[in-house]
Image (spheres, grey):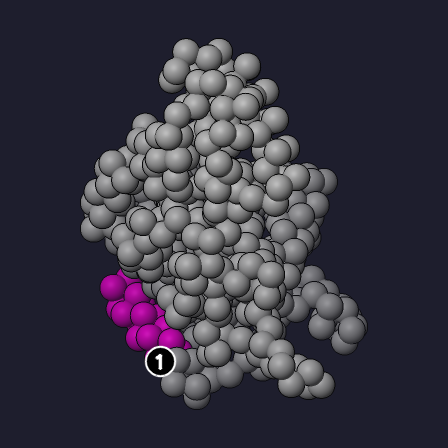
């Protein structure tokens, strides 16, 4: 059944019909569409626009459609243009003429806006839960590794020693922000567009507050033109997904490096690795690489919708139907990636000895050696120069700072004493850094306490 046609004298061209149709992808919205219709009908009966009896018949019809779709007994067909036409046609088939009253005071424009909001709200909540699970895994690893010393890098050059806990806590912060971004979006988008009609509201005495409350919105939207043509929340949604993917991708990049023969900081579990068809020795980090790779695809969806929206005059235009596939694919991709990433890091083995050994090379304690001089009254800039010279000596002799004999130290500065070795041990370097946010044990303990409360909230 077609929802329109009265003013047409010719049939739609078949290719044009298919080009215009969205049922193949918006069928996904069946539950949102039916839930929205039920609320609409309840409101129509509360305001006396429909009778109780009419409402009951329509609700009964909608319930049976929902059941049948869920059971797999009702599938998309080739005749309906979109999910809205599909449900309405089925309703009329099931309950007869009363079904034709469902669309009173409504347009597909406010209907699709509602469906997408209900969908986004559900998916944001699911994504948030997956992030929460991921943070639980991270917190467990953070707690287990407060004394796992590893090198920290800048410019991919070894910089200063820190702990694996501290490194993981950087990602904890990122995913925590992702969750708060989701909360912001949920709060901002949670206004109900239903009742906006095609663009200019309707002449019926609709109770928009009531529909909004039935659907658990904070209230109705305040401008009917904006209501039907606003896709900001979807752009924000794609931005939320893009930032999550960016964080996962950065982490994956590190894991891929850590998993190489050169680093050997971690070993990805067999369950999350793949082999080569030709090289028998290979165990590749494909899952991490794919997550990194899929990031581009999610960014693409964000740019696709931003570009679709940039030239659209008020109010609804069919261009907006192009919001669906990017949003659906972005969230499916992102949720899948979070889930797999969580599985990968919970089964990954951390090679603590290799991390520790790596932190000892590369002069990661050079800053602390300079601080030693500063603590003995040498101005920092001079101390920097002295340690630079010592590093050069070490490079010539192929030793690390802690293996360089005291007389070599003394040749460059008489300030050095036997306690220099204690001052530049990896443990001292880490343990002395205790301002909040630093890797030292006192600071990390405070942070872990905060994380534990956060996870329980
Ligand atoms: N399938 C359409 C979409 O996704 C539904 C709204 C159609 N409205 C219209 N006036 N053609 O945007």
Residue 37 located within the stretch drawn in magenta: no
Residue beneath the point at 71% across and 85% down:
278
| Vertical comparison of 67 with 231: above or below | below
Q: How many marks?
A: 1
Residue 237 or residue 195, whichever sits in front: 237
Identify which residue, 215 or 155, lies in the foreground.
155
> Magenta residues?
48-67
* Figure quadrant of the N terminus: bottom right
Name which residue lies at 41% across and 11% down: 377
Quadrant of res 446: top left
The secondary structure that dominates the magenta segment is helix
The one of 423 and 197 positioned closer to us in this rendering: 423
* Residue 50 screen position, x and y as percent: 33, 59
Horizontal side, residue 168 vs residue 250: left or right: left
Could you say where residue 292 lies in the image, as x and y percent from the top left?
A: 60, 59
Q: Is residue 70 above or below residue 248?
A: below
Which residue lies most toward the front here? 407
> Where residue 59 appears, x then y in whole percent?
32, 70
Residue at x-position 47% and y-position 53%: 357
Q: Going by the image, does 155 lie left or right of 13?
A: left
> Is 396 rendered above or below residue 48?
above
Residue at image coords 25%, 50%? 455
Residue 16, quarter of picture: bottom right
Q: Position of residue 246 (x, y in %)?
A: 56, 50
Residue receiving disc 1: 67
Q: Mark 1: give few (<14), some (14-19) or many (20+) Cα within 10 Å.
A: some
Q: Can residue 3 be seen in this view?
A: no
Residue 59 is one of the magenta-drawn residues? yes
Q: Is 265 on the left or on the right of 143, as rendered?
A: right
Report whether residue 295 is seen. yes
Callout 1 secondary element: helix
């Amino acid at each position: 059944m077609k929802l329109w046609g009265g003013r047409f004298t010719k049939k739609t061209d078949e290719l044009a019909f298919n080009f215009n149709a969205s049922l193949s992808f918006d069928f996904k919205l069946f539950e949102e569409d039916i839930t929205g219709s039920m609320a609409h009908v309840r409101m129509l009966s509360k305001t006396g626009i429909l009778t109780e009896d009419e409402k009951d018949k329509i609700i009964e019809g909608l319930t049976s459609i929902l059941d049948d779709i869920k059971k797999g007994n009702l599938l998309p067909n080739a005749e309906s243009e979109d999910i809205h036409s599909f449900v309405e046609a089925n309703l009329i088939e099931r309950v007869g003429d009363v079904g034709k009253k469902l669309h009173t005071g409504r347009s597909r424009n406010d209907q699709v806006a509602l469906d997408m909001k209900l969908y986004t709200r559900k998916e944001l909540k699911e994504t948030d839960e997956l992030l929460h699970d991921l943070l639980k895994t991270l917190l467990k690893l953070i707690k287990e590794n407060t004394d796992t010393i590893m090198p920290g890098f800048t410019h991919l050059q070894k910089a200063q020693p820190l702990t694996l806990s501290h490194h993981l806590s950087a990602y904890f912060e990122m995913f925590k922000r992702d969750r708060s971004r989701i909360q912001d979006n949920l709060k901002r988008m949670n206004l109900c567009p239903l009742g906006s009609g095609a663009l200019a509201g309707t002449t019926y005495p609709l109770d928009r507050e009531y529909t909004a409350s039935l659907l658990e919105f904070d209230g109705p939207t305040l401008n009917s033109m904006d209501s039907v043509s606003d896709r900001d929340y979807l752009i924000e949604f794609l931005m939320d997904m893009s930032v999550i993917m960016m964080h996962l991708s950065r982490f994956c990049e590190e894991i891929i490096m850590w998993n190489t023969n050169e680093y050997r900081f971690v070993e990805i579990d067999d369950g999350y690795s793949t082999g080569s068809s030709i090289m028998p020795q290979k165990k590749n980090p494909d899952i991490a690489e794919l997550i990194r790779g899929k990031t581009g695809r999610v960014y693409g969806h964000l740019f696709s919708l931003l570009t679709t929206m940039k030239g659209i005059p008020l109010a609804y235009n069919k261009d907006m139907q192009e919001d669906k596939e990017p949003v659906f694919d972005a969230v499916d991709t992102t949720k899948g990636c979070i889930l797999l990433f969580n599985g990968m890091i919970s089964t990954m083995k951390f090679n603590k000895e290799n991390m520790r050994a790596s932190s000892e090379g590369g002069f990661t304690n050079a800053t602390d050696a300079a601080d030693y001089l500063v603590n003995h009254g040498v101005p920092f800039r001079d101390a920097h120069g002295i340690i630079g010279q010592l590093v050069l000596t070490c490079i010539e002799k192929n030793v690390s700072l802690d293996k360089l004999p005291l007389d070599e130290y003394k040749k460059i500065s008489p300030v050095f004493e036997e306690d220099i070795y204690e001052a530049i041990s990896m443990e001292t370097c880490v343990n002395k850094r205790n301002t909040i946010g630093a890797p030292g044990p006192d600071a990390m303990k405070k942070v872990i306490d905060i994380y534990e409360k956060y996870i329980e909230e």
